[in-house]
Image: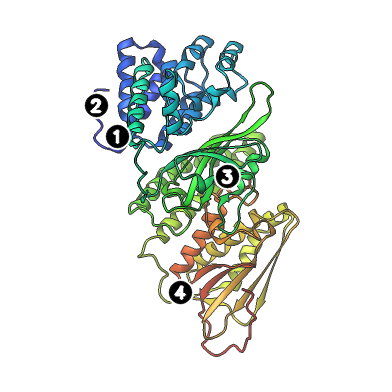
Amino acid sequence: MRQAPSDRRASIAAWRQLSDILAQRGNQLLEGDIRRGLHALAVLRPQVPENVRRDCARAIARHGRFAPLVALYANDVPAVSAAMLASARLSEADWLALLPATGAMARSVLAGRDDLPLNVRRALASLGSGSVALPQPAVAVAVEAALAPPVEAVSSPAAEDTDVGVPANDPGSNQISELVRRIDKFQSTRGSQPAVVRTPRASFLFETGPDGVIHWVDGIARGSAIGLSIAEAAFGGEPGTDGVAAGAFRQRAEMINARMILDGIPADAGEWRFSALPWFDPATGQFRGYRGSARRPYRNETPYGQPSTEDSGDSIRQLIHELRSPLNAISGFAQIISGQMFGPVSGAYRTMAETIVADAASVQAIIDDLETAARAGESAAGEPAGETVDVAAVVAQVENDLAGLLAEQRIELSISRVGGSFFARAGDANARRMVGRLLTALVDVSEPGAIMVGQLVTETAHDDMLQLRIVRPSTIRFATAANLLDPGFSPEGEAPGAAILSLGFSLRLVDSLARGAGGRLDIGHNALTLHLPSANPSADTGLDVQQSE
């Protein structure tokens, strides 16, 4: 608390340290230190990104027992508040003292928990169904506040562009003054026409009915979202939500960072990420719909093709370096145990150590893929001049390597050869990585018992390209190219499948490596086609290959 953070990174570090100290030792600190710590967090909050605050809330929620810190997080934005209140463990007295200082969104999270003390649930029920509703639009709030005394804080994501911290020891004064300021603003602009919004809006709130159709929004134009359904996935870039939301709706589960596409005015149109919670009638328990908030996607959530930051490659390389050191240590100790280098070891421990060595090798391969992806994004990346590789031999080797996985998944892989020799201008290691990652990714999303069909063909002489075509598995038959290249896309509409690295990451890696060699990866309606520059003799092959795309 004596330090003044000089930059964003220092502010994030201070936020994490203060949150951890207050969560674990808050009940043992002096009152003055507690007040200073909470004040410091309130000052730091505007400099700390929302995702960092959300991750901190999740990390300290279960082992934290300090009510003032829970109250501070509960008065943050909905995503941070929900992350804290969904798992926080407080005493009955602390919960009862906390309820008056929480907003409607926070209470809606608490109302969905079934592990709270009986008296706390009764207190929530006594507040009425309106206490767990999302905040109404700013205009309606201003009118209601003018007729009756304010009883709780009101937040509107479109009304403010600053983060207002509410001290845990005195929430009422800041809430009332903020509400009075909004009433004055409403009355001063009531007779004027709203200005045309030219910059994209950053967030909005919404509510759906039991059928999943949005019937109320706050923060964007009503016509952009009203009538849109979150119960069914939209395809082909049409306005709507992705399969993650549709799958969660069927199970009445929480939606976290699902994808939404909106049409309308330029300020509202485009891609959004939204989180929502189901809500139920307190009296009957009947499902009433979803309430949630939406935001613009972060840079690391945008689909393939968006520009990255200049230092992204350095950040990835630093992360890879930090991952390799403990991984090598774990693998080394496991090899010592497996090899009984320091003495006899029981069979059970040797088996466990061998499993750890194998898992470490798999993780090492993933780290190598991440490093390759980071290098592939640099403009200086490229293949060594004059290097050639037999793609047919590479495909045969990859098929042999995948034999165990194919047998486990009961998938049959059939890649036919069409044409003569299949030499390409590419490095052997990169060719193996391209073919291996492409086939592995498609096997991971294929259904058990499926047949995966492909062709390795020598392209016509005028294009001077080799092609490896793989027919789309049925699970991604109708997915758009943007979805397939999106790391957040899930073919089944539920949680991602068995692959540690997503399908989108794998396809983007293959495309980056192919472009570095002078080729590309095409995503067609029926097949995915890897193009590599041919190194075969320039004589006409005489093939008339029928194009399948």
Q: Secondary structure at mark 4?
A: loop
Residue pointed to by mark 4: 387
**Amino acid carrying mark 3 in the image:** Asp
Disc 1, SS? helix
Which residue shows up at 42% across the image and 69% down it? 383
Camera-side mark, 2 or 3: 2
Identified by mark 4, the residue type is: Glu
When asked about the image quadrant of residue 504, the answer is bottom right
- Asked if disc 2 and disc 4 are in contact, CB closer than 8 Å, the reply is no
Residue 285 or residue 47, whichever sits in front: 285
Mark 1 lies on residue: 10
Q: Which circle's residue, 4 or 3, is located before the other in the chain?
A: 3
Specify which label sits upstream in the sequence, 3 or 1.
1
Disc nearer the start of the sequence (2/3): 2
Pointer 3 residue? 359
Q: Is residue 20 above or below residue 373?
A: above
In the rendered image, residue 513, in percent from the top left (x then y), is placed at 47, 64
Instruction: Choose the circle earlier in sequence order: 1 or 2.
Output: 2
Alpha carbon of mark 2 to alpha carbon of mark 3: how far? 43 Å
